[in-house]
Amino acid sequence: MTATASSPHPLSDGPTVGAEFGRRQVHAVAACYFVASFAALGLPPYLTEILPGLGDTTARWAGLLYVVPTVFGALGAPLWGRAADRFGRKRLLLRAQLGLAVSFLLAGWADSLSAFAAALVLQGILGGTFAASNGYLAAALSGAHLSKALTLMQGAARAALVFAPIAVGSLTPWISPHRQYALLAVLPLTAALMLALLPEPGPRAPEAAAEGEPGGTGPLAPLAALYCFEFAFVFSTVISFPYLISLIEDRIPGVSPVVSGALFALPHLCYLLFAMRVHQVVERRPGPGIATGFALVALGLAGHGAAGSLPAFVGVRLLLGAGLTLGLVSLSVLAADCAKGRPPGGMFGSLELVSKGGAVAAGLAAVAVSSLFGPSAPALTGTAIALVALVAAAFPATFRR
């Protein structure tokens, strides 16, 4: 693939964008990730309904099985990333989609708890569509074009997180959540067919280490800051997820499930509405964006501990949404910087390991602190982690830009 001066649009009006790879291709990759994520993100909240039919009458294994795909996905991500660099990013992205389809079929037709658990393990090992998609994009794009694409991919993840559980719940009167695993296997299969039509990213043009620097042989951006901030950001935001509904019900007695669900979704909707506008602000200076994101996350989570009414919860959820949007977009910009001069599959595979590790650690911490100190403790724990990360992000030398 060679660089070309094609007709301008938001994702193809700069260097290192191939003639066959532009906005439509990026949107296709994001759409494929969105549809393939429906079962992966929409069905786990219904494990407490699935497991009694498999012999676990009290659904006591729901918490463990909830994180099984994440754990094994994290362990497999670096391996699959390096394989993509060696054997082709498109090939490994197709493998991830087909792997999801196979694991969903096995989960949907499992007739025992052990078979269902094995299918979830395979989902983690054979999946990894997010890291594979990012590695594929990073092989074709760079700089602001790549960071915009990564921002769009996060938007696809947030959209699936918001809408997939609603879709699964709407189908439940006609088909059980357990059998929906098999039904929704058609989505990654469809995604694989769409991806098969996309080009294999070729070698990018040499990249300069800084804007305007000739030769493209400058020092690589450090990965340590990216990995540390990714872990801290995922931990501090995810830790509030598992017990948010119980916290809302505890503080606002009689609140309807619809309102609770809307409050849960509100920060993710903020990202969907404002992410691209925020990208225009932080694309040149992600460091201040990450620091501000951590500050807003800390304030929002701290507010969860004091909120006692519906307007108060709306306010702190919007504050958290602002921090979520700023932080995730800034991390996408930083990831695009770090991808310059590195094999993208290996880097994004390692980044996925760090991200999923943060999610697993957050889930375990939420269980521990909630059992000891109550439903508000996870949010306050996330506040403490965000404040520690804020101190580190406040020093510009951390980013070496």
Image: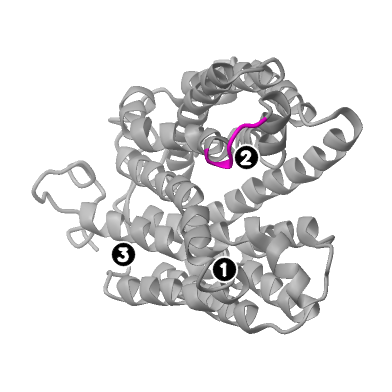
> Which residue carries the number 1 mark?
127
Which is the main secondary structure of the residues drawn in magenta?
loop
x%, y% of residue 283? 36, 29
Residue 1 horizontal side relative to residue 186, left or right: left
Secondary structure of the residue carrying tag 2 is helix
Give the mark, 1 or 2, whose residue is nearer the N terminus.
Answer: 1
Secondary structure of the residue carrying tag 1 is loop
Residue 324 horizontal side relative to residue 255, left or right: left
Q: Residues within 10 Å of mark 3 (few under 14, many from 20)?
A: some
Give the mark, 3 or 1, whose residue is nearer the N terminus.
Answer: 1
> Which residue carries the number 2 mark?
227
x%, y% of residue 297? 59, 23
Q: State the CA–CA distance, disc 3 to disc 1.
A: 24 Å
Residue 79 horizontal side relative to residue 363, left or right: left
Q: Residue furthest front?
A: 254
> Which residue carries the number 3 mark?
202
Q: State the CA–CA distance, disc 1 to disc 2.
A: 21 Å
User: At 66% from the left edge and 35% from the top edge, which residue is drawn?
Assistant: 228
Amino acid carrying mark 1 in the image:
Gly
